[in-house]
């Protein structure tokens, strides 16, 4: 279940889980500034940004002012991944925030296929369990992608 539930409220957005409106500043360049609402439950920031981008499709980026968010571990993790305090819509869903476990890395070993007379890289092992999970506020359910079983 999502750690947040962002809804339209009056002239802005509100988090029902925190029980208060979000302090969002709107910019002319289609970005928004999200001010820190105080102590947050783990996972709140990721879910809030996801739902803000869904609730307000015109927003191209969300700025998290570093001076306000520097004490929040979730924000520091996000800053480290994007190397900025600006989270662009186009990059947000590509971040490893959505992975429930670390990605399996290929060994770098090359395998020779004698029949075709070529070398190709050895594939990493198949992932185990759930590969991806995301809460969709429109249907109020999680979208989950488990590892596919190979056909035998």
Image: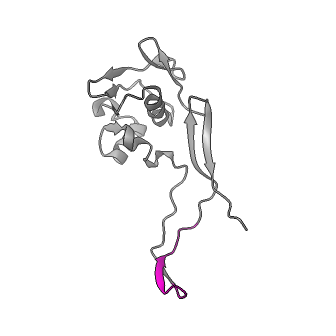
124, above or below 96, in the image: below
Extreme-right residue of the structure: 152
Which quarter of the rendering shows the C terminus? bottom right
The total of numbered circles placed on residues is 0
Magenta residues, start to end:
113-125
67, above or below 116, in the image: above
How is the model colour-coded?
one colour
> Is residue 121 one of those drawn in magenta?
yes
Question: Seen in the image, is 36 located left or right of residue 1?
Answer: left
Q: Tell me the residue at 42%/29% (across/down).
A: 57
Question: Which residue is nearer to you in this view: 111 or 76?
Answer: 111
Residue 86: which quarter of the image?
A: top left
Question: Which residue is nearer to you in this view: 142 or 21?
Answer: 142
Question: Seen in the image, is 32 located left or right of residue 114?
Answer: left
Extreme-left residue of the structure: 28
Extreme-top residue of the structure: 10
Q: Tell me the residue at 48%/65% (across/down).
A: 105
Q: Tell me the residue at 57%/67% (across/down).
A: 125
Question: Which residue is nearer to you in this view: 73 or 63?
Answer: 63
Q: Tell me the residue at 36%/34% (across/down).
A: 71
> Is residue 81 one of those drawn in magenta?
no
Which quarter of the rendering shows the N terminus? top right
Magenta: main secondary structure equals loop
14, above or below 60, in the image: above
Residue 126: which quarter of the image?
A: bottom right
Q: Position of residue 150 (x, y in %)?
A: 68, 64
Q: Position of residue 60 (x, y in %)?
A: 34, 33
Q: Position of residue 53 (x, y in %)?
A: 43, 31
């Amino acid at each position: 279940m999502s750690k947040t539930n962002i809804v339209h409220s009056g002239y802005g957005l509100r988090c029902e889980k925190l029980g208060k409106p979000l302090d969002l500043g709107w910019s002319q360049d289609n970005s928004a500034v999200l001010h820190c609402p105080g102590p947050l439950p783990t996972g709140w920031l990721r879910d809030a940004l996801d739902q803000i981008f869904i609730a307000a499709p015109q927003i191209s980026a969300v700025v998290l002012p570093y001076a306000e968010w520097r004490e929040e571990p979730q924000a520091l993790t996000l800053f480290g991944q994007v190397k900025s305090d600006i989270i662009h819509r186009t990059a947000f869903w590509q971040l490893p925030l959505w992975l429930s476990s670390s990605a399996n890395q290929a060994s770098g070993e090359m395998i020779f296929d004698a029949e075709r007379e070529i070398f190709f890289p050895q594939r990493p092992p198949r992932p185990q369990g759930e590969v991806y999970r995301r809460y969709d506020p429109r249907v109020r359910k999680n979208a989950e992608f488990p590892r596919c079983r190979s056909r035998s």
